[in-house]
């Protein structure tokens, strides 16, 4: 594989994107194209890797509780299966946009390859507002959606998981409906309730993966988590688990934010006490052990390590110059705009990319699938030990690609993922 000077190519690309703020689709395509250039991929192969394997669109009509009929559009994009069954979440959201689902399916292809688990990428969703539907309406909707796609998903075909607006209960309904057609098949979805074959350790997996990835990065710089000052934006599943585990590892979480507001304590926030407060008050706002700060300033607070664990596009050219952290761990999907990437790399900030940093969730989903297929469940210690092995090896693999192609961690991760998928595709014979 030949290498090219990525700087000239970056200038070409950047001139074309200055006018618009990057969305997830454009950023994913851009990173893929950069990686393909660095790897010297054949242009026909490059094109074929971008084209999704299958795009499914279905109408889901259900009776509402008041007897009226209502119809929702469901999507499933199956991007690539060169390395194994396709894998990705199902989201229930009013704005399930086909373009976005496409980008996220593609991103799952590269993410599973970086994690070195035997999957391809998929993503799906239903354009609905789950907050406006009753539990029984959500169940009917999920079952109708499953009826429409049951012959296009499967243990060795496509394995869905929860995403925005869906949860283990949603997966339980999919499993039940799918099993009516195909017999009891716990491995058809992951992120299930423990009682139906879900894995121990799955709930904490993404946050725990963030800790292991942070440890690997800091070790590489001759540092450890202990004594470092952390700022965490977002205190949902990922942010709160990351905060707890970092706190336990001796890290000092000095600021945290969520939808309700933001808090700061330069001596470190007592995370176990904060967790109790959040449970009782539905947010970090009003926590006694820290001072309230402006939520918009959370990303630019003084710290060593910044962990965006909420929405995409939060680090952009408006705030990138103000960021004081030396390391950014992308626990959220696509939190950093490419323009911010450029500003931060000039400042010498090291960014651990989302495609690697938040892969703990999909890795433990793989463990859940493996346990279901074997019919043999692991204890939580085994799940966590195996997860650490995968994350530590993953970091070594990314660093190896960084050396080979003389690039940053984001391009190291993308070249690693794209190269693995390209090699599998060529070995299987893609031109026949």
Image (tube, grey):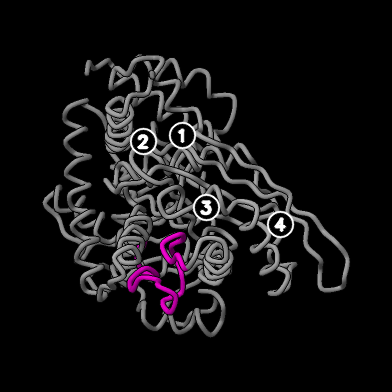
Q: Is mark 3 on a helix, strand or loop?
A: loop
Residue 282 sits in quarter: bottom right
Q: What element carries label 2?
A: loop
- Given contact means CB atoms under 8 Å apart, are the residues at marks 1 and 3 in contact? no
Span highlighted in magenta in the image: 184-206
The residue at the point 71 percent across, 60 percent down is: 129
Tell me where residue 213 appears, x and y as whole percent: 25, 54
Asked whether, in this view, residue 135 is left or right of residue 20, the answer is right
Q: Distance between the residues labelled 1 and 3?
A: 16 Å
| Sequence-first tag of 4 and 1 | 1
Tell me where residue 406 appears, x and y as whole percent: 21, 26
The residue at the point 23 percent across, 17 percent down is: 3
Which residue is at the front of the view, 169 or 425? 425
**Category of crowding for the residue at label 2, using alpha-carbon neighbours closer than 10 angstroms: few (below 14), some (14–19), many (at least 20):** many
Nearer the camera: disc 1 or disc 2: 2
> As displayed, is residue 274 above or below residue 333?
below
Q: How far apart are marks 4 and 1 (CA)?
A: 25 Å
Tell me where residue 20 appears, x and y as whole percent: 59, 28
Nearer the camera: disc 4 or disc 2: 2
Q: Mark 4 points at which residue?
A: 128
Quick check: can you spot residue 416?
yes
| Sequence-first tag of 2 and 3 | 2
Quadrant assignment for the N terminus: top left
- Which numbered marker is on residue 28? 1
Q: Mark 3 points at which residue?
A: 311
| Sequence-first tag of 3 and 4 | 4
Tell me where residue 119 appears, x and y as whole percent: 36, 46
Residue 214 included in the magenta stretch of the image: no
Q: Name the residue under label 2.
A: 82
**Category of crowding for the residue at label 1, using alpha-carbon neighbours closer than 10 angstroms: few (below 14), some (14–19), many (at least 20):** some
| Sequence-first tag of 1 and 3 | 1
């Amino acid at each position: 594989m030949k290498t090219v000077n990525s700087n000239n190519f970056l200038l070409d690309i950047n001139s074309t994107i200055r006018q618009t703020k990057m969305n997830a689709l454009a950023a994913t395509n851009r990173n893929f194209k950069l990686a393909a250039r660095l790897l010297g991929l054949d242009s026909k192969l490059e094109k074929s890797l971008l084209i999704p394997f299958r795009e499914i669109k279905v109408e889901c009509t259900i009776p509402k509780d008041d007897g009226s009929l209502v119809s929702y559009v469901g999507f499933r994009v199956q991007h690539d299966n060169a390395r194994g069954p396709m894998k990705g979440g199902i989201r229930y959201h009013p704005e399930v946009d086909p373009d976005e689902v496409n980008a996220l399916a593609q991103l799952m292809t590269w993410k599973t390859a970086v994690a070195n688990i035997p999957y391809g990428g998929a993503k799906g969703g239903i354009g609905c507002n789950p907050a406006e539907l009753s539990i029984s309406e959500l169940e009917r909707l999920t079952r109708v959606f499953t009826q429409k796609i049951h012959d296009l998903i499967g243990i060795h075909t496509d394995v869905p998981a929860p995403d925005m607006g869906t949860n283990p209960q949603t997966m339980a309904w999919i499993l039940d409906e799918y099993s009516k057609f195909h017999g009891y098949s716990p491995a058809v979805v992951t992120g299930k309730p423990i009682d139906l074959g879900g894995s121990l350790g799955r709930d904490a997996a993404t946050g725990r993966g963030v800790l292991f990835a942070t440890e690997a990065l800091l070790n590489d710089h001759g540092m450890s988590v202990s004594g470092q000052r952390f700022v965490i934006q977002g205190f949902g599943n990922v942010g709160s688990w990351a905060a707890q585990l970092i706190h336990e590892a001796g890290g000092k979480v000095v600021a945290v934010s969520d939808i309700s507001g933001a808090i700061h304590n330069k001596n470190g926030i007592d995370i176990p006490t904060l967790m109790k407060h959040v449970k009782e008050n539905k947010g970090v706002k009003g926590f006694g052990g820290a001072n309230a700060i402006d939520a918009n300033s959370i990303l630019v607070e003084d710290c060593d390590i910044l962990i965006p664990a909420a929405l995409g596009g939060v680090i952009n050219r408006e705030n990138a110059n103000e960021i004081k952290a030396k390391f950014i761990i992308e626990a959220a999907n696509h939190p950093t705009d490419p323009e911010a990437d450029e500003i931060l790399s000039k400042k010498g900030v090291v960014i651990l990319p989302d495609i690697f940093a938040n892969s703990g969730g999909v890795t433990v989903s793989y463990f859940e699938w493996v346990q279901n297929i074997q019919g043999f469940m692991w204890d939580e210690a085994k799940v966590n030990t195996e997860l650490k092995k995968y994350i530590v090896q993953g970091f070594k693999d990314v660093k190896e690609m960084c050396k080979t192609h003389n690039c940053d961690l984001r391009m190291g991760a993308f070249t690693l993922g794209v190269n693995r998928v390209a090699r599998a595709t060529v070995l299987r014979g893609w031109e026949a």
